[in-house]
Image (tube, rainbow, N blue to C red):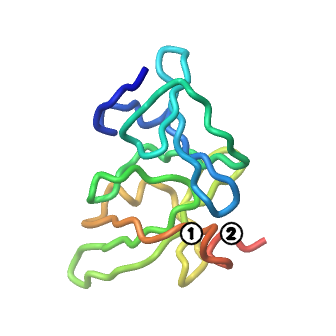
Amino acid sequence: MHMSGSPHSVKIKSLERLRNGTKIAGYRREESGRLYFSKDLFWWNGTAIQHEQVDVCIGRYDNRQRPLFVNDIIKVKHGGFFPRTQHYAIVQLADRAELVNLQSGLSFDLDILEKVKHVQFVSYTFLNPGSGVKS
């Protein structure tokens, strides 16, 4: 059984990206206690997708309506009198996701995304060594 629909109809908190290393295998969501899988966020069915890693959706979209996940790299345009653009990695800590500024290494709560002018997906931390959390 195939289901289609825009990603906007999906309860975004239940959305996960499934990976095998650096290759994205697909996506998984839970709806009414059932799991659905998709290779492209468009067609969904009950056939499980093999995967090794899971990146959790952070419950937000970028300006192009792309859902954002842990391990994404985003470009953020801050407003004000002196607008500036900065790049952040979305990282998973033990109990929550947060943003790490790729220039300074400083961490920020996801709430800063509510106050910015523009958020754009750029890449993935798993394709850019050194862009995640420094341990």
Regarding mark 2 in the picture, which secondary structure is present there?
loop
The circle on residue 100 is 1
Quarter that holds the C terminus: bottom right
Q: Relative to 96, is 37 above or below?
A: above
- Residue at 43% x, 20% y is 1
Is 135 left or right of 85, judged from the image as shown? right
Residue plotted at (47% across, 21% down): 31
In the rendered structure, which amino acid carries the disc numbered 1? Val
Between 23 and 10, the residue placed more toward the observer is 23
- CB under 8 Å between discs 1 and 2: yes
Q: Percent position (x, y) of residue 97?
A: 58, 52
| Relative image position of residue 118 (x, y in whole percent) | 27, 66
Instruction: Give, as a three-letter code, the residue at label 2.
Output: Val
Callout 1: SS: strand
Viewer-proximal residue among 23 and 8: 23
Pick the front one: 86 or 32: 32
The local crowd at label 2, few if under 14, some if 14 to 19, many if 20 or more residues have their Cα within 10 Å, is: some
Whole-percent x and y of residue 33?
55, 15
